[in-house]
Image: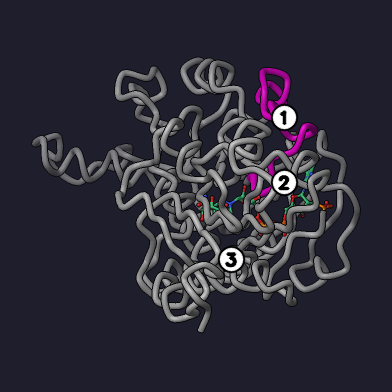
Amino acid sequence: MMSAQQMLKVFVTRRIPQEGMKILQNAGMCNLSVWDSDEPVPRAELLKGVAGAHGLLCLLSDKIDAEVLDAAGPNLKVISTFSVGCDHLAIEEIKKQGIRVGYTPDVLTDATAELTVALLLATARRLPEGVEEVKNGGWSTWKPLWLCGYGLSGSTVGVIGLGRIGLAIARRLKPFGVKRLLYTGRQPKPQAQEVDGEYVPLDTLVRESDFVVVSCSLTPDTQGLCDKTFFSKMKKTSIFINTSRGVVVNQEDLFEALSSGQIAAAGLDVTTPEPLPTNHPLLTLKNCVVLPHIGSATYSTRGVMSELTANNLLAGLTGSEMPSELKL
Ligand code: NDP
Ligand code: DGY
């Protein structure tokens, strides 16, 4: 047990599942300061809270940039994010300052892939519209031409970014009778064999897929990737799904593609901004299903993410091997 003076200051930017908090509390080395709320920490409180900290446990909604690092000062050894995505972290700055980064790959892969499949089916088979019609009296009788959508059987699915989550999505979709599984990325993946994945140029994927699923990480190359040109190449009967990050999509161009009938429908778990304002044009469209970034939201997944985030942080504080360290 460390003396009060030896305790290392840790700032936690949100209320997180208790599994992780217990690990930090029981470690006996952290002087914990928590933004004890379900809502994001205001910027001014983040800058105040991080001052002098040795460790920072943050969320994807916290922008960790040079200003935050300056506010933290030279004690800061480790940033542990409660996410697999690290696009909210100024990686170059962090690297320059020799700070280690922990993140949560793998443990949320199944939950996110499952949600992506749910979103795809809900969008393609128009589930939110159907539920609404039942409630508002629009359901008059069984009608041959009413609420028809698109099925996966015999279809071509294109996955943009066949990483951990992309592959898990492909594995789940194949048994629905998918005929061709196309994917694109920076290089072909040997593990694609498992799903008979065909590595193709982006252009081919967009033109030939009945379902385009975006599961890549957000990088300068993928920011704005899905724009007017991209949607103009998709078939009029195709469905667009994004569970990656909102800014991979140009939302004005997506609105245009959906409202003009250029593409059939879209399902989004991520948007710009988050939350999407309730008066956003995309929310006026019946053929757009928007979820509030719940890809990893199962009780058990969030519990395990919390444990991993805490263990990464402790390893960073003690200078030992992290369970999941981001290679900088
Ligand atoms: P991985 O790193 O395993 O996969 C990311 C994939 O993106 C890699 O296959 C990579 O390809 C690909 N990629 C990178 N650049 C490009 C590009 N220019 N074009 C096409 N593909 C590209 O990460 P995960 O699968 O674990 O997570 C992926 C992302 O999903 C996260 O970064 C996060 O943004 C998002 N996510 C969203 C969740 C939600 O709640 N909706 C939950 C969890 C994650 P290559 O290997 O060839 O470089
Ligand atoms: C992530 O981890 O990057 C997700 O967006 C939330 O789980």
Classify mark 3: residues with Cα within 10 Å, few (<14), some (14-19) or many (20+).
many
Residue type, label 1: Leu
Residue position for label 3: 109
Residue position for label 2: 160
Residue position for label 1: 225
Q: Is residue 257 above or below residue 115?
A: above
- Judged left or right of residue 179, residue 176 is left
Residue type, label 3: Thr
Tell me: is circle 3 under 8 Å from ligand 1. yes
Q: Is residue 270 above or below residue 155?
A: above
In this figure, which colouring scheme has been used for the structure? one colour
Q: Which residues are magenta?
A: 214-233
- Image x and y of residue 255, in percent: 50, 19
Q: Earlier in the sequence, mark 1 or mark 2?
A: 2
- Judged left or right of residue 196, residue 110 is left
- Whether the magenta-drawn stretch holds residue 230 is answered as yes
The residue most toward the left is: 137
Q: In the rendered structure, are the residues bearing label 3 and label 1 in contact, judged by CB atoms less than 8 Å apart?
A: no
Determine the main secondary structure of the stretch shown in magenta.
loop
Number of numbered discs: 3
Residue, x 9% and y 36% (percent of image)? Answer: 137
Q: Earlier in the sequence, mark 3 or mark 1?
A: 3
Under tag 3, what secondary structure? helix
Q: CA distance from mark 1 to mark 2?
A: 10 Å
Q: Nearer the viewer, mark 3 or mark 2?
A: 3
| Nearer to us in this view, 275 or 98 | 98
Under tag 1, what secondary structure? loop
Tell me: is circle 1 under 8 Å from ligand 1. yes
Tell me: is circle 2 under 8 Å from ligand 1. yes
